[in-house]
Amino acid sequence: MKRQSGFTLVEIAIVLVIIGLLLGGVLKGQEMITQGRIKNAIIDFTGTTAAYYAYIDRYKTLPGDDNQASTRWGTTILPSSANGNGDGIITGQYNATGAASSETQFFWMHLRAAGLVVGQASSPKQPINSAGGIVGVQTGSGPSSGSPSGVLKTNSSDTGFISLMVCSSGLPDRVAAAVDMQLDDGVTNTGNIRAQQTAVPDPIVTNPMGPPYTDTGTTPITICRTL
């Protein structure tokens, strides 16, 4: 009689152990990436807040709205067109693109010129977050003039966010939820951090997304925190 070839129970067990170790390593690596993104997103919010108040304390004016910025550092560092109007409101959208034309772009230029944020002072581009989105600032509805109106309102009677806020776009839902939980209440449409699903061109909308946060790990979320 011929013996039938095959794997022994010991060999199968060894293969299963190896597969388990590989899967465990992959899952652990993914968890480390997620935790790193959470940490970086929190640093983006807290770091921007610290730089903002440091600028106010040092120069007695708002970064971005500063109408003496190019005079202070010279036009070799900041073009004269990068001055704000000094009205006490940082106007423009948090995700403004193109040549420097809005105070939300000047915001980063002024902080960089002051050495409070890393980067080239002449660049109007917003910092990139750990998920490849941007970190930007916006005052309520981002009016070009006049008083801002509220955004990310919980309900029709809520005034929403009217003051300056920091927004981070395109964060995976798990990261956004963890940041909200650690810095606020963990709810999408209440507290000092509110969320909306990232879209293109991703304006900050009137109402936030309803709770709870999704947990797919892939849904892109934009979260904003009031300063």
Image (spheres, grey):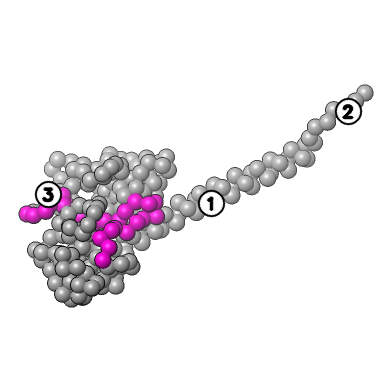
Q: Which element type, helix, strand or loop, lies under badge 2? A: loop
Residue 62 drawn above or below residue 126: below
The alpha-carbon separation of the residues under discs 3 and 1 comes to 43 Å
Q: Judge from the rendering whether residue 99 lies leftward or rightward of residue 4; answer left or right.
A: left
Q: Amino acid at mark 3?
A: Ser
The alpha-carbon separation of the residues under discs 2 and 1 comes to 44 Å
Q: Judge from the rendering whether residue 13 lies leftward or rightward of residue 5; answer left or right.
A: left
> Callout 3 environment at 10 Å: few (<14), some (14 to 19), or many (20+)?
some
What are the residue bounds of the magenta stretch?
Answer: 122-146
Q: Residue 29: which disc?
A: 1
Q: Is there any visible trace of residue 185 in the rendered image?
A: no
Q: Residue 149: which disc?
A: 3
Report x, y in % for residue 120: 30, 67
> Callout 2 environment at 10 Å: few (<14), some (14 to 19), or many (20+)?
few
Q: Which element type, helix, strand or loop, lies under badge 1? A: helix
Residue 48 drawn above or below residue 134: below
Q: Amino acid at mark 2?
A: Arg
